Image: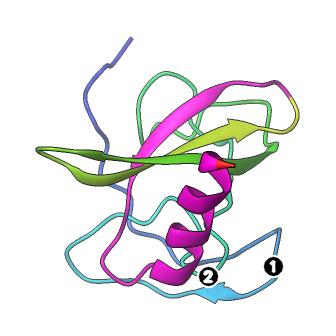
Amino acid sequence: MRKNFIYKNEEFVCENCKKLNPLLKGTCRNHCKFCLFSKHVDKNTPGDRESDCKGLMEPIFVDQDGKKGYVITHKCTKCGKEIRNKVVKDDDFDVIINLSLKQRR
């Protein structure tokens, strides 16, 4: 079983907000830049696309990592798996701030 990251740079239409997420050179987008939702497509390794679940991944938490910057924790609405993903430079930062404020309530 492969454990290292598999580079995937694919545009997609978000299943939550229905907006097109275009390619962004130099990064791998794994969540919507508008609403931060993702899709449970990877099983063991980022980029493997081997998950059978395919549930929506809801952004539930955001924190700051000294090396990675801001990191979003997503939780699958179907199976409950949690996955952490780095914020991408063109993500809607207002949505990130609102998520962090929601955590403090």
Circle 1 crowding by C-alpha within 10 Å: few under 14, some 14–19, many from 20: few
Instruction: Determine which residue is flagged by label 2.
Output: 34
**Residue located 33% across and 19% down the image:** 2
Q: Can you say whether 80 is above or below 74 in the image?
A: above
How many numbered markers are drawn?
2
In the rendered view, would you say 94 is above or below 4?
A: below
Across and down, in percent, residue 99 comes to 61, 61
Query: Which amino acid is tagged 2?
Result: Phe
Tell which of 81 and 40 is nearer to you.
Answer: 81
Which contiguous range is marked in magenta? 79-104
**Residue farthest to the front?**
105
Left or right placement of residue 46 versus residue 56 in this view: left
Give how far across and how far down residue 69 sits, in percent: 22, 55
Instruction: Give me the residue at 61% from left, 70% from top.
Output: 98
Q: Which residue is mark 1?
A: 17
Quarter of image, res 65: top left
